Image: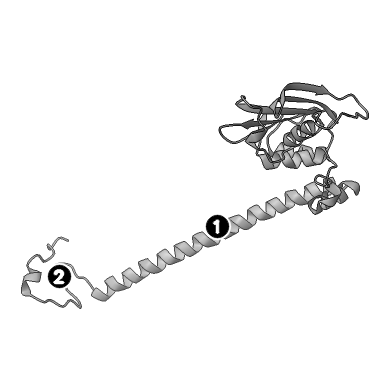
Amino acid sequence: MLSSIHITNFALIDELFVEFPKGLTVITGETGAGKSILMDALSLALGERADTAMIRVGAERAVIEAMFEGVNNSRIAAKLAALDAENADNLILRREIRLKGNSRCFVNDTPVPVASLKEIGDLLVDIHGQHEHQSLLRTETHLGILDQYAKLQNLLDDFIGRFEKFYDTHVSLRNAYSKKNSIDERKAVIEYYLREIDAVRPQRGRTRMSRMNCASPNMLKNFRPFPPNC
């Protein structure tokens, strides 16, 4: 569950730290009170698209950090392992937006691509608004939901492992065929040169010119016979 969010230099917010107790939390207020700013900040921490216009006027960067407690999700654990990020009960997602340069994303203090941050964020939170983040409406999540419901994670992990081994073997075999073709081409070139040499039939102690058209006797002035000991 989302336990806290820390916002710095975002929109109109100088600095804000909000803790969420267990159970249902309701945030109310008049129009313009800042509820949507809080949700926009959370969306950024979950990997949504960033814009430098979101940085508070006069600041160089905005930072949003969201902490989740009691995260026990095998799919998230697999993604953390692939990113070499620490897999702990508490998960901290941090997003930095800079005026100069691209935004930076972190999962448990490990730098990650924004696409990976979004994949993890989609597994943590559904933001129900204009149907933008309802995972049941996103077809790419359907297989994962079915696998989780049917408790097929172990079977899925085994399949992924076997497929990766198959793919690695396939790539190695393809590289071997490519190398063999290169060797065959090189062999054909060498055999061609050998046939040309055999056709000339060079002999020790003499010079033989084959199929050469000489326009002038002067063209032969630089030719010398081979020494007898060659």
Q: Which amino acid does label 2 sit on?
A: Thr
Q: Where in the figure is residue 112, as x and y percent of width and height?
A: 66, 36
Residue placed under numbered mark 2 in the picture: 207
The image quadrant where one finds the C terminus is bottom left
Q: Is residue 21 left or right of residue 195?
A: right
| x 64%, y 52%: residue | 168
Query: Could you tell me if the residues under marks 2 and 1 are in contact, i.e. CB atoms within 8 Å?
Result: no
Could you tell me the amino acid type at mark 1?
Answer: Asn
Q: Mark 1 points at which residue?
A: 175
**Helix, strand or loop at mark 1:** helix
Furthest toward the front, the residue is 31
Query: In the rendered image of this protein, does residue 104 appear above or below residue 224?
Result: above
- Where residue 223 appears, as percent x and y from the top left, is 11, 66
Q: Quadrant of residue 199?
A: bottom left
User: What x and y, as percent, mark residue 69?
Assistant: 83, 28
Residue 111 in the figure: left or right of residue 162: left
Label 1 crowd (10 A; few <14 / some 14-19 / many >=20): few
